[in-house]
Amino acid sequence: MPGLTLVATPIGNLGDLSPRALAALRGADAVLCEDTRVTGAMLARHGVSVTLMPLHEHNEDDQTPLVLDRLRAGQRVALVSDAGTPLVSDPGYRLVRAAIAAGLTVGAVPGPNAALMALTLSGLPPHPFLFHGFLPPRAGPRAAALARLRAAERAGLSATLVFHESPHRLAESLAAMAAALGGERPAAVARELTKRFEEVRRGSLGGLAAHYAGAEARGEICVVAGPAPAEAGGAEAGLEAQLRGALEAGMSLRDAAAAVAEATGLPRRQVYARALAIGREEAKRP
């Protein structure tokens, strides 16, 4: 049928391209993709020759009117990302919204999704869950994003949290999560899913942060954190646990206090005083 079809593609193992997805790509008049080299190689492996059009975050606004013209002319256009389900941390949302607003047909062929696979392999409660995508790359905005999540949890949100992360930022992101969400919170790091070196490492946020502070991570990565534990005393109830988690993750007293103060909304001086007290307690231990 004419229209726009969102087609999920493999996240690593090329054998995961479904027969229906392959048929949709083979029957398309054009395939929109993030990187024509990546999609072209995948299609060539299956003997598919089709017009490829780049659609990424930098040209989506310019490409959208051209794609809508194709759809109005009765063409079949497929949209893929480099891997996984389109629109999930990938471009295409603005195009889909425009196609819906124009009354054009939009469909989908479901398939691989790294976030859902990581969730199901994590051993953590599968529902409800909240998919966040990538955290901001810089420390300040990242701490602010985690603080907003923590505030939502204090307001009643109870859900497993799912993130994407890049290998070179994994250790610092885990440390920031331990500081904001609590170092003892159960979590999992899933990487290279469906590939030869697939790995799911389970533990606490603090323990995982400590591990990856000294271990290199490679490949595509998802981080899954369990729901917030029930709190009995407001923001101060989890203060010590969050501080200890941040310190166990390798943060300095000053950085741990700043991150936890941001996450809890408590006065920085108060949090720093408690961090100093924890530091003195730890120093007295044999």
Image (spheres, helix red, strand yellow):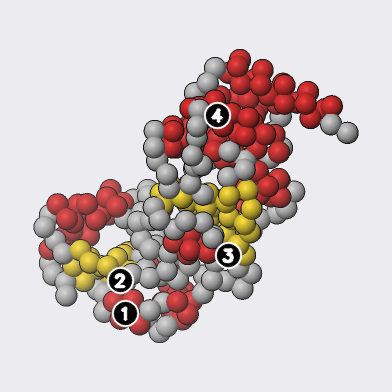
For mark 4, does the 10 Å Cα neighbourhood hold few (<14), some (14 to 19), or many (20 or more) residues?
A: few
Q: Earlier in the sequence, mark 3 or mark 4?
A: 3
Residue at x 58%, y 38% (from the top left corner):
182
Read off the residue under disc 1.
Answer: 20
Q: CA distance from mark 2 to mark 3?
A: 23 Å
Identify the mark at residue 237; answer none if there is no mark.
Answer: 4
Q: Earlier in the sequence, mark 1 or mark 2?
A: 1
> Which residue type does callout 3 highlight?
Glu
Q: Are marks 1 and 3 in contact (CB under 8 Å)?
A: no
For mark 3, does the 10 Å Cα neighbourhood hold few (<14), some (14 to 19), or many (20 or more) residues?
A: many
Tell me residue 285's x, y (percent): 84, 31
Q: Earlier in the sequence, mark 4 or mark 2?
A: 2
Front-lying residue, 232 or 72: 232
Judged from the image, the secondary structure of the residue bearing numbered disc 2 is strand
Tell me residue 217's x, y (percent): 66, 55
For the view shown, which residue lies furthest in the right direction? 286
> Which residue type does callout 2 highlight?
Val
> Which residue type does callout 4 highlight?
Ala
Read off the residue under disc 2.
Answer: 109
Tell me residue 111's x, y (percent): 38, 70
Q: Where the N terminus falls, by quadrant?
A: bottom left
